[in-house]
Image (spheres, rainbow, N blue to C red):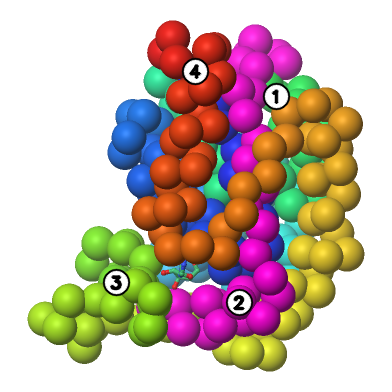
Amino acid sequence: MHLMLLGAPASGKGTQATRLAQRFGLVHISTGEMLRQACVEGSDLGILAAEYLSDGQLVPDHLVVELVLDAIDRAPGGFIMDGFPRTLRQAKAFDTMLQQRDLPLDAVILIEVADCTLIERGTGRRIDPVTGQIYHLLFAPPPAEIAGRLEQRDDDSAQVVKERLYIYQHTTSEVVTHYQQQNLLTRVDGSGPPDKVFDHIFGLLSLNPRQAEQ
Ligand code: ADP
Ligand code: AMP
C-alpha cells in the first residue's frame, strides 16, 4: 500500500502515520524526521538544512526530493508519506518518481484541524529521544518514568509554529489542490482524540477495495 498524509504542522500526521505503518506493515517516511536526524549527525545535508528547520522555513525542494527518492527505493513493501510533498514542485517530482516505478498512490488523506488547536498541539508536543514516540503534555501525556527525558523540538516555540502554519497556508495548500484534482484526496476531521482519528482513517482504507485486497 502507498499512502500519503497531508495536514498542517501539528495536525497529527506523525501520530497517525506511526499507527498506520504498524497496522499495515508500511515504512513510515517522515521528511522532517530524516532532516532532524541529518542535523543531529552533522552530515552535509544536516548542515545545509539546520537553519531552515530552526526558522520553520521549508528546506529547498531538490534536497528533500533526493531524500525521498532514496527512501521510497528502500520501501519495497509499501510506504506512508508524512510531511512530503510540501510544495507543488515536490508533488510533481513525486508523481514522476511513482510513475517511473509504476507505484500508484492508494490514498491521500488530509487531516483537518482548526488553527487554534494546531498551536496548542505544536507547543505542547514532546518527543522521547530514546524511542522517537510523540507525546503531548495535555493530550497524550507520557508515563511518569520517562517524563523527565522528553524533549521539545526547537521549531515548536509558539512563534515558529505560527510561521510554519503561515507557510502551510500559503504554499502547501497548493499540494492539497493538486491531489484533489487527481481525485485522490480524502478529508478527515483530525479534531477528535488520536484513537478516533485512527479509526476514521482505518475505516476509509478498509472501504477501498484496492487496499482491502492487500
Ligand atoms: P504532525 O506530525 O502533523 O506535526 P504530530 O503527530 O507530531 O503532528 O502531533 C502534534 C502534537 O499533537 C503531538 O504532541 C501529539 O501528541 C498531539 N496529537 C496528535 N494527534 C492528536 C489528537 N488527535 N488529539 C490531541 N492531540 C494530538
Ligand atoms: P515536520 O517534522 O514535518 O513538522 O517538519 C519539520 C521541518 O522540516 C519543516 O518545518 C521544514 O523545515 C522541514 N521539512 C520537512 N519536510 C519538508 C519538505 N517536504 N519540504 C521542505 N522542508 C521540509
Amino acid bearing label 4:
Gln
Q: Is mark 2 within 8 Å of ligand 1?
A: yes
Q: Name the residue under label 1.
A: 97
Is label 1 in contact with label 3 (beta carbons under 8 Å)?
A: no
Chain-order first, disc 4 or disc 3: 3
Above-or-below relation of 81 to 35: above
Furthest residue toward left = 145
**Which segment did they paint magenta?**
99-126
Separation of marks 2 and 3 at Cα, in angstroms = 22 Å
Please state which amino acid type lies under the numbered disc 1.
Answer: Met
Of labels 2 and 3, the one closer to you: 2
Report the residue marked by disc 2.
117
Residue closer to the observer: 84 or 3: 3
Q: What amino acid type should be assigned to the residue bearing mark 3? A: Asp
Q: Where is residue 104 in the image (x, y as percent from the top left)?
A: 65, 17
Q: Residue at x 61, y 54 (%)?
A: 189
Q: Which of marks 4 and 2 is nearer the N terminus?
A: 2
Query: Circle 4 sits in a helix, a strand or a loop, which is it?
Result: helix
Which of the 4 quarters of the picture holds residue 95? top right
| Distance between mark 4 and mark 2 Cα atoms | 31 Å
Q: Residue at x 63, y 41 (%)?
A: 109
Q: Residue at x 60, y 23 (%)?
A: 106
SS for tag 3? loop
